[in-house]
Image (cartoon, rainbow, N blue to C red):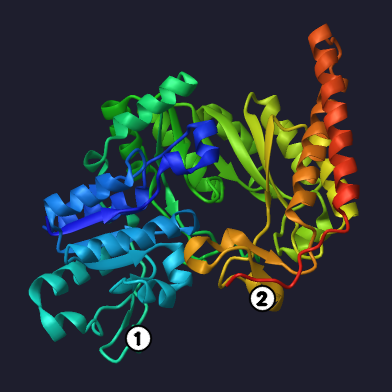
Amino acid sequence: MHVLLTHGYHLWDDPHERQTMRPYPPLGILYIASHLRAQGVDVGVFDSTFMATGDFIRTLQESRPRVVGIYANMLTRVRVLAMIAAAKQVGAKVVVGGPDPANWAERYLMHGADAVAIGEGEETLTELAAHWGDHAGKAADDLSQIPGLIWCDTTGEVIRNMPRRQLPNLDAQPFPARDLVDIDAYVRTWRRHHGQGSVSLITARGCPFHCTWCSHAVYGHSHRRRSPANVADEVSHIVDRYNPELVWYADDVFTIHRKWLRQYADELASRGIRRPFETITREDRLDEATMDTLAEMGCYRIWVGAESGSQRVLDKMKRKTDASRVIDMVHGLQKRGIQAGMFIMLGYDGEELQDLEETVRVLKKAAPDVFLTTVSYPIKNTPYFEQVKDRIVSRKPWAEGSDRDFDVVGRHSRRYYDFATRWMVGSVNASRLNNQIDRSPRDEARLVKARLSAQIGRAGMRWTAGERVQRESQT
């Protein structure tokens, strides 16, 4: 095997995933694998999702790849650093890519990577694999002629090559090499825990919006769509080969282009394909016609990136969405039989108690089927990071954690936001139950429990309000 691609995510290391059990394979490296294979490169994929660390080491020893390409994000940084070391022990050249290496290239090079690929990896990995296959010694170490790489020369100086152009035609790319991983294992896991199997795909690359906290390390602010026919071809293949009950469109904003969505819906209908699906969007990319189209296509759940119920906070984020309009959009989705989920971000710089109260008010009025909260963290190279970088402290050394471990001096403690989440969940559940016309005795008990949980959360917020992040760092 000339090239081995992997990603370092282990389901059993992820407490949240062990609870939800909704895993999906790494589409990014499967796209790279299919591109390499189309160029005649001998390529394999080690899918670490259901594997253990020892499995990767055994694979390295048995296959002895000349090149190991590793996708890394914040969740997988610690694992990936260990995988780099393991690959180097068998004499492989190592290239890393993905959002975390793009933001921390020098650190990954310090920890043994021979190169960091920036942006889309298909063409960069093809050229790099050929270069390392054709050259040895100093010639192999000179990567100056390959766009899209960051690397170190013989003096240790970090060299940033010219950026790689983005792929101009996504339809020209082969579908992800799903045959190189056990997709059936993912579908079985879904069916075992949820009674229905699901397979993922993407219809576009990149997001053109400029939210201050969001990383655009791989695709920049570009947005490129595949044609409706090309996507429908892939869905048809997925249905024929894996026959999942559900589909997950893993786009950043699935409904971003209304005309395209209508064309895609017509394309699926012309082929007799109607597979229930889940996806993500924004409030401003929903309207009556779009929601009608989603319902027609079989959308069963859509997640709305609301982030906050406070317009003041949304404006600070440069979110360019309407906090009040999301209420109508959630109701519109539910009216059409589509479950509505909401993402809420707590602790953005400058957020105050009244902003949290506004968020609770919006959540109560919207009454989404489900909502998830996260505490904001400044990701390297984002506007948010630049805004607060002089006040950032980390709870862990770089090689033992991630940007998720960043806190901002002066902000409330993590305990405060744990209580805030409890307050929100309890308040929204109590509001939903209180608005039920006919409540059973069991519902009455749930109402009491929800109110009590909300009170405990609110009391905990008052108790921990004086706890603030201090100027202490382990980096």
Question: Quick check: can you spot residue 139?
Answer: yes
Q: Which quarter of the figure is the C terminus placed in?
A: bottom right
Relative to 110, residue 397 above or below: above
Residue at the bottom extreme, as displayed: 155
* Amino acid type of the residue that numbered disc 1 sits on in the rendered structure: Ile
* Amino acid type of the residue that numbered disc 2 sits on in the rendered structure: Lys
Identify the residue position indicated by label 1 in the image. 159
Task: Tally the marks.
Answer: 2
* Camera-side residue of 93 and 31: 93
- Horizontally, residue 315 falls left or right of residue 174, namely right
Residue 308 x, y percent position in the rendering: 76, 51
* Camera-side residue of 211 and 69: 69
Mark 1–mark 2 distance (CA, rounded to whole Å): 25 Å
Identify the residue position indicated by label 2 in the image. 389
Rendered image: mark on residue 24: none
Identify the residue at horizontal 43%, vertical 37% (top origin).
23
SS category of the residue bearing label 1:
strand
Identify the residue at horizontal 44%, vertical 70% (top origin).
102
- Horizontally, residue 323 falls left or right of residue 158, namely right
